[in-house]
Amino acid sequence: MYSDAGSSVVRLNIGGKKFNTTLDTLTHREPHSMLAAMFSGRHTVCKDSEKGYVFVDRDGKHFRHVLNWLRDGVVPNLTDSESSELLREAEYYQLLGLVDGITEVMNKKKEGEEMDTELTRTDIIKCVQSEKVRLRGVNLSGLDLSKLDLSYVDFSYACLKNVFFSRANLHCAKFRDVDAENTIFHNATLRECEFTGANLRGALLAGANLQSANLQDACLIDCSFCGADLRSAHLQTADLTNANLEGANLEGANLKGAKLNNANLKGANLQRAYLRHVNLRDTHLEGAKLDGANLLGAIR
């Protein structure tokens, strides 16, 4: 059972999988994480009446890796797909150290692999020294382009699967009709970017700045936008099925005709957002701010 003592045993039920750990483990290494906040004593946690397990509605498949990170600070060696899954869990629990660790491991792995790309990171760096860079239709799958200044680059129609754009400056870049499935845009600057018709299924955009970005008709299924800045973004007819927008800022965003089936908008800022005739029946809106939102004809 949970108590205030640091060595107290904490019992967790993560999506049906049960784990035992200690308060120190959950709060010491990542003191600003969601897990640390849950057990800080500032919040009431719900436990089952029989054995005192705290339930968290997440897939428990990778939670042992989360606990091992909190205990030892070691990033596990996993397959690319498993690393991507763990990255989503780390982002959800706001374990920023683990997010950076997984990204670094995946980047190093990509560097050591023979990628079927038409250009390398070095080629891209040389290209961006030009005034107008067009990489339209180029295959850049799996490249590490993190932390680069790629503002105004035209990537339209390119294959960008599994590309790392973490913390890159992509201000006003064009991604029209790109295939960017599972691409990492974590904390990237994407202000005023064009993603019209893009395939971003499973992409990670947590903490990204997408202010005034154009995402009309984009496939955003299973995307993570946790904490992202989507103020005044254009999301008309975008498919946000199963997308995670928890804590995102969508003030003034246009979601006309968007699909929000099972989308997570808990704690999101939807003030003055355009949601006319949008089906919100299966959308999670707990704690969302809807002041001034246009909800005329919305299904709730």
Image (spheres, grey):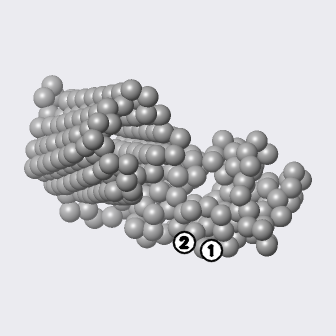
- Residue 61, disc: 2
Q: Amino acid at mark 1?
A: Lys
Residue drawn at x 53%, y 67% as measured from the top left: 59
In-front residue for pair 39/132 = 39
- Residue 197, disc: none
Residue 184 appears in the rendering: no
Residue drawn at x 51%, y 46% as measured from the top left: 286
Q: Position of residue 114 (x, y in %)?
A: 28, 64
Drawn side of residue 33 relative to residue 150, left or right = right
Q: Quadrant of residue 174?
A: top left
Q: Position of residue 33 (x, y in %)?
A: 64, 46
In terms of secondary structure, where does tag 2 sit?
helix
Is disc 1 surrounded by few (<14), some (14 to 19) or many (20+) residues within 10 Å?
Answer: some
Residue drawn at x 80%, y 54% as measured from the top left: 24
The residue carrying mark 1 is 17
Is disc 2 surrounded by few (<14), some (14 to 19) or many (20+) residues within 10 Å?
Answer: some
Q: Quadrant of residue 296?
A: top left
Drawn side of residue 50 relative to residue 148, left or right = right
Q: Quadrant of residue 277?
A: top left
Comes first in the chain, label 1 or label 2: 1
Which residue occupies the extreme right position in the image?
Answer: 5
Cβ–Cβ below 8 Å for labels 1 and 2? Answer: yes
Quadrant into which the N terminus falls: bottom right
In terms of secondary structure, where does tag 1 sit?
strand
Drawn side of residue 244 relative to residue 91, left or right = left
CA–CA distance in space, label 1 to label 2: 8 Å
Residue 228 appears in the rendering: yes
Drawn side of residue 24 relative to residue 76, left or right = right
